[in-house]
Structures are given as C-alpha cells and as structure tokens.
Amino acid sequence: MDVLTKSAPVNFTPGAIVEIKRLIEEDSINEKGEQLRVGVKGGGCSGLSYVLGFDQKDEKDQEFQIDGINVIMNPAHEIYLFGMEIDWEDGLNSRGFVFKNPNASKTCGCGTSFAV
C-alpha cells in the first residue's frame, strides 16, 4: 500500500485512537480492505455534516496514517477540516466521537453539523 507521507490534515486524541483501533479489530475492517474515511457532506442543521466511517479508497482520495491507522479523505474536504481534532467521549451524558473544528463558524447543538 502506498501511503503518502504528508502530514495529516486532522488529528485524533489518544482516546479516539483507542476507540478506532477497537472498532477496526471488532469489525474485521482490515479483512474487508476498508480504511477510515474522514470528510464532509452537505446537510445537517448548520449546512455541512462530518463523515467518519470505514470505506473503500477511491482513486481521488488522499491517504495518510495516524498512529498506525490508515485514513482516507477526498482532497476537496481538506479546506473544511484542516486542523480539526477528533476526540472520543465515553461519559454518562455523552458517548461518541466529538469534532473540534477551528474552521467552523457555527456548529449545531449535536456537534455533528457545522458551517464555514
């Protein structure tokens, strides 16, 4: 696999890395040939929503590695996500991935939708 050596446009906290690696092991992601996709899509209450899931690499995707995790992203999404930190919260009131995006001018209450 030819992984680019450019620096990753997003960062994961140690908690997020542990959870992602757990999901990779649990769902046999490596056997399916899928990689972690980070991106955006239109929609949500603020205009754009975050994409975080396992997917097949597309020919236009850029690829990078974070702590041994292969990550793919459409290069057009980097403008919206550059410098973003993805965290994992496992508390009583909230459980899931949290997106801290310095490019967002507005976010929704659920934290999965934003505007630039």
Image: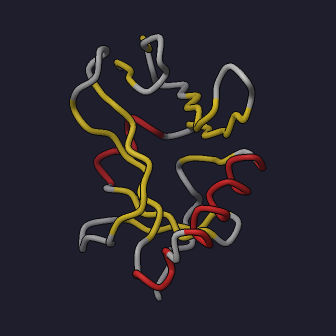
Residue at (37, 46) in percent of width and height:
39
Quarter of the picture containing the C terminus is: top left
Q: Write the residue at 28% across / 22% down.
A: 44
Where is residue 50? Give x, y as percent: 39, 36
Query: For residue 34, which quarter of the picture?
Result: bottom left
Compared to residue 36, the image places residue 97 above or below, namely above
x and y percentages locating residue 73 in the rendered image: 38, 57
How many numbered marks are there?
A: 0
In the picture, measured across the screen, residue 59 lies left or right of residue 28, that is left
Seen in the picture, residue 60 relative to 45 is either above or below; the reply is below
Residue 9 position within the rendered picture, expressed as x and y whole percent measured from the top left: 53, 49
The color scheme shown is secondary structure
Q: Residue at x 66, y 38 (%)?
A: 87
**Residue 56 picture location, percent across and down:** 32, 71
For this orientation, the residue located farthest to the right is 14
Residue 17 vertical position relative to residue 31 in the rendered view, above or below: above
Residue sitting nearer the eye, 36 or 7:
36
13 left or right, relative to 112: right
> On screen, 57 above or below 94?
below
In the current view of this chain or complex, which residue is farthest to the front?
Answer: 92
Residue situated furthest bottom in the rendering? 1
Q: Residue at x 22, y 27 (%)?
A: 43
Q: Is residue 85 left or right of residue 67?
A: left
